[in-house]
Amino acid sequence: MGESVKKVLLVDDDRLILSVINQVLVSAGYEVFLAENGKEAIELGTKNAPDLAILDMSMPSMDGIAVAKWFRESSSIPFIFLSAYSDEDLVAQAVDEGALGYLVKPVDPPQLLAAVRAALVRSLEIHHLKDTSDQLNQALAGDRTISTAVGILVYRDRLTEEKAFQKLRQYARSNNRKLSDVAEELVSATESVNKIN
């Protein structure tokens, strides 16, 4: 699972389900926070920053969809849904909210743990892509030379902007050089070649 204990927020208005799933998760080595309603879920999520939330879709007053919406808009807590129904409309709603999984109750422990592990891995991948995308946007906005170098790689190697930026960044890192210096070198070399043509 990795060095640090993963934190899971479990939200369900059924105490028996909370207890059973809590035991499965704790036995598998997760640190679990329990909430019986949406308001509690948001409070615990804000306070503890879990790596994943497991949300019951239908709860009184504030359902799992509302909690998911709040998490998506106000924090970066990834989530999967639990539901007593496998209704296609509910699944579509879950996907629209950005759910990383959808489990139908009663859920068996191996299925639950597999879904939790898959969601945690997917969440890390999404987080990494977002970081790379943010760095790319920051670099393109902040440094015209880097932007030009990325453009050269996009054209020359037929890459997306993100892949071109990653290639440039990887080259700079592996040669212990500043990204801006590598970009400057590439732009200068390209300008020199273009003068010859």
Image (cartoon, rainbow, N blue to C red):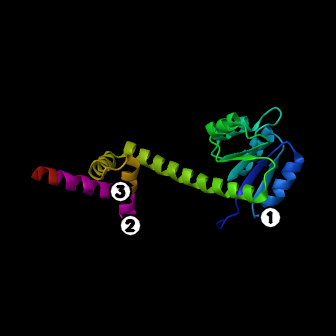
- The alpha-carbon separation of the residues under discs 1 and 3 comes to 44 Å
The residue at the far left in this view is 196
Callout 1 amino acid: Ser
Residue corresponding to mark 2:
174
Q: Residue at x 73, y 51 (%)?
A: 48
Residue corresponding to mark 3:
168
Q: Residue at x 75, y 64 (%)?
A: 29
- Of pointers 2 and 3, the one earlier in the residue sequence: 3
* Dominant SS in magenta: helix
User: Mark 3, residues whose alpha carbon is within 10 Å: few (<14), some, or many (≥20)?
Assistant: many
Callout 3 amino acid: Leu
- Of pointers 1 and 2, the one earlier in the residue sequence: 1
Residue 156, x across and y down, in percent: 26, 51
On whether residue 179 falls in the magenta region, the answer is: yes
The residue at the far top in this view is 61
Residue corresponding to mark 1:
27
Residue 32, x across and y down, in percent: 78, 55
Q: Secondary structure at mark 3?
A: helix
| Residue range corresponding to the magenta coloring | 168-192
Q: Quadrant of the N terminus?
A: bottom right
User: Mark 2, residues whose alpha carbon is within 10 Å: few (<14), some, or many (≥20)?
Assistant: few
Q: Residue at x 63, y 40 (%)?
A: 95
Q: Residue at x 69, y 55 (%)?
A: 116
As displayed, is residue 171 above or below residue 15? below
Callout 2 amino acid: Ser
Residue 26, x across and y down, in percent: 80, 61
Callout 2–callout 3 Cβ contact below 8 Å: no
- Of pointers 1 and 3, the one earlier in the residue sequence: 1
